[in-house]
Image (cartoon, rainbow, N blue to C red):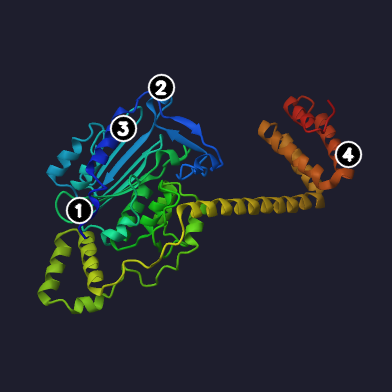
């Protein structure tokens, strides 16, 4: 499907150039300042804008705020060629994008500290790479997926998931393909997030690219879910299978830090994933309808060209011939505001459940301590005998729990006598004695 006429107005290549320019202007001596956002969305609700209350720490990318801070920034940039290796001309272009990167016919990797990537990511995708990720400690989260055959939906279907900055489709300069970009809002991600296993994430992106080309819309729905939009905006059609995300989709949700409660709320209206997915269309009927010459040509292409690319093209042709929907879904009924309100309610419910579970676990633990105080005292003695400060902390906590377990009539007297015995055995253990006093086991 060619989307030039439908989407190019909202997805111009200049967007990428502007983002690249912003990166090049970012100060190299310090990261963006951290601000603490209010937990309540009341202050922002009147702006008809998505509240950021579900994030505790966010980044502000204002150079004026950044001045005077001398902390390290970290940017990770990576590209991979999946369908086929780069040719000589493509490789030369990639090498011109950075003098420091590790560049090969199948991969481009670079990490930056106190500087940033200055290459043109979109052109690199158009010229040979198939997947791309950018992660930065100042909040940037961006992925790109090149789809040589274009998106397997109509322009209207894609437009339901479109966001001005987070979800964009860039048509190829020539042909029907293009690049799908999903970019997280820098003010929506936690400063504490790191990406330690990029190999796993790149493998997940490759899998997502295959699923997307086969018509699975769950990736697009998750992209809309984490995007920054109007509160009264209606959600896109809810795809099947949100209750049981694939490992690749779960990695994507983790990468963009989509809250688990929001995922659960969104999945509440999602039907079960189909047993026969769009990746398994009616192959036998389609093959039977091909001529011997067509089958020979397909075999030749599979052996000479990229098997993955040929497979995607054939599957798209088969689905089109079968006139089947790419992925089952149900019509949207909820606004973004309703989803966020339901998320807050569910998070509060989960919190109450966690508190109740912790209380029940502690009750059972105290019952166990009360049933065998001698064993607890023996364990405390073993910890004190190590003469290690960290073990002193554990011993005092255990003694405190034993006091509570035995109750107000027996607990204080019994545990104070144990503490007195420990001081007698270890009179020079000042750290231990100080901790016992601070917890009320020994007199001042």
Q: Pick whichever of labels 3 and 1 is earlier in the sequence.
A: 1
Cβ atoms under marks 3 and 1 closer than 8 Å: no
Give yes or no for contact between labels 1 and 4 (Cβ–Cβ under 8 Å). Answer: no
Q: Are marks 2 and 4 in contact (CB under 8 Å)?
A: no
Q: Which residue is mark 2?
A: 67
When asked about the image quadrant of residue 13, the answer is: top left
Residue at horizontal 24 percent and vertical 36 percent from the top: 119
- Which of pointers 4 and 3 lies earlier in the amino acid sequence? 3
4 and 3 marks in contact (CB < 8 Å): no
Horizontal placement of 284 versus 31: left or right?
left
Q: Nearer the viewer, residue 62 or 385?
A: 62
Question: Disc 3 and disc 2: Cα gap in Å?
Answer: 16 Å
Quadrant containing the N terminus in the rendered view: bottom left
Q: Where, by quadrant of the figure, is residue 198 drawn?
A: top left
* Mark 3, secondary structure of its residue: helix
Task: Look at 15% across and 55% down and name the residue there.
Answer: 175
* Numbered tag placed on residue 413 in the rendering: 4
Q: Nearer the viewer, residue 324 or 284?
A: 324
User: In the rendered view, would you say 174 is above or below 120?
Assistant: below
Label 2 environment density (alpha carbons within 10 Å; few <14, some 14–19, many ≥20): some
- Helix, strand or loop at mark 2: loop
Location of residue 244 with respect to 76 vertically, above or below: below
Distance from Cα at disc 4 to Cα at disc 3: 65 Å
Task: Provide residue 197's location: percent of width, then percent of height.
Answer: 40, 45
Neighbours of disc 3 within 10 Å: few (<14), some (14-19), many (20+): some
The span from disc 2 to disc 4 (Cα, nearest Å) is 59 Å
In the rendered image, the vertical position of residue 301 relative to residue 57, given as above or below: below
Q: Select label 1 or label 4 by which is in front.
A: 1
Could you tell me if the residues under marks 3 and 2 are in contact, i.e. CB atoms within 8 Å? Answer: no
CA gap, disc 1 and disc 2: 42 Å
């Amino acid at each position: 499907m060619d989307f030039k006429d439908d989407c190019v107005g909202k997805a111009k290549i200049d967007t990428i150039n502007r983002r690249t320019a912003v990166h090049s202007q970012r100060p190299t001596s310090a990261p963006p300042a951290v601000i603490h956002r209010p937990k309540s969305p009341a202050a922002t609700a009147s702006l008809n804008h998505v509240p950021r209350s579900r994030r505790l720490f966010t980044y502000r990318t204002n150079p004026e705020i950044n001045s005077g801070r001398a902390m390290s920034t970290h940017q990770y940039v990576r590209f991979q060629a999946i369908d086929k290796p780069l040719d000589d001309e493509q490789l030369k272009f990639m090498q011109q994008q950075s003098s420091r990167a590790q560049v090969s016919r199948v991969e481009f990797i670079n990490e930056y500290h106190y500087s940033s990537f200055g290459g043109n990511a979109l052109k690199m995708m158009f010229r040979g790479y198939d997947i791309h990720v950018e992660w930065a400690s100042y909040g940037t989260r961006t992925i790109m997926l090149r789809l040589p055959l274009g998106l397997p939906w109509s322009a209207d279907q894609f437009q339901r998931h479109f966001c001005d900055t987070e979800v964009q489709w860039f048509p190829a300069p020539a042909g029907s393909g293009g690049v799908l970009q999903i970019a997280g809002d820098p003010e929506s991600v936690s400063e504490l997030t790191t990406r330690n296993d990029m190999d796993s994430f790149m493998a997940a992106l490759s899998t997502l690219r295959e699923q997307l080309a086969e018509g699975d819309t769950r990736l697009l729905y998750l992209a809309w879910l984490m995007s920054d939009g109007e509160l009264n905006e209606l959600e896109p059609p809810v795809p099947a299978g949100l209750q049981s995300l694939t490992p690749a989709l779960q990695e994507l949700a983790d990468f963009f830090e989509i809250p688990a409660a929001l995922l659960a709320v969104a999945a509440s209206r999602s039907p079960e994933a189909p047993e026969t997915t769009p990746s398994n269309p009616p192959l036998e009927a389609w093959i039977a309808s091909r001529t011997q010459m067509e089958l020979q040509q397909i075999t030749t292409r599979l052996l000479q060209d990229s098997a993955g690319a040929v497979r995607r093209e054939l599957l798209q042709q088969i689905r089109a011939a079968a006139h089947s929907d790419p992925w089952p879904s149900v019509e949207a009924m909820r606004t973004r505001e309703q989803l966020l309100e339901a998320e807050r309610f569910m998070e509060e419910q989960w919190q109450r459940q966690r508190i109740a579970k912790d209380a029940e676990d502690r009750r059972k633990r105290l019952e166990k301590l009360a049933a065998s105080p001698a064993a607890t005292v023996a364990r405390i003695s073993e910890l004190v005998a190590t003469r290690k400060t960290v073990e002193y902390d554990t011993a005092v906590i255990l003694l405190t729990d034993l006091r509570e377990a035995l109750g107000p009539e027996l607990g204080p007297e019994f545990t104070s006598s144990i503490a007195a015995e420990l001081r007698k055995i270890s009179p020079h253990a000042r750290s231990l004695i100080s901790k016992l006093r601070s917890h009320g086991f020994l007199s001042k």
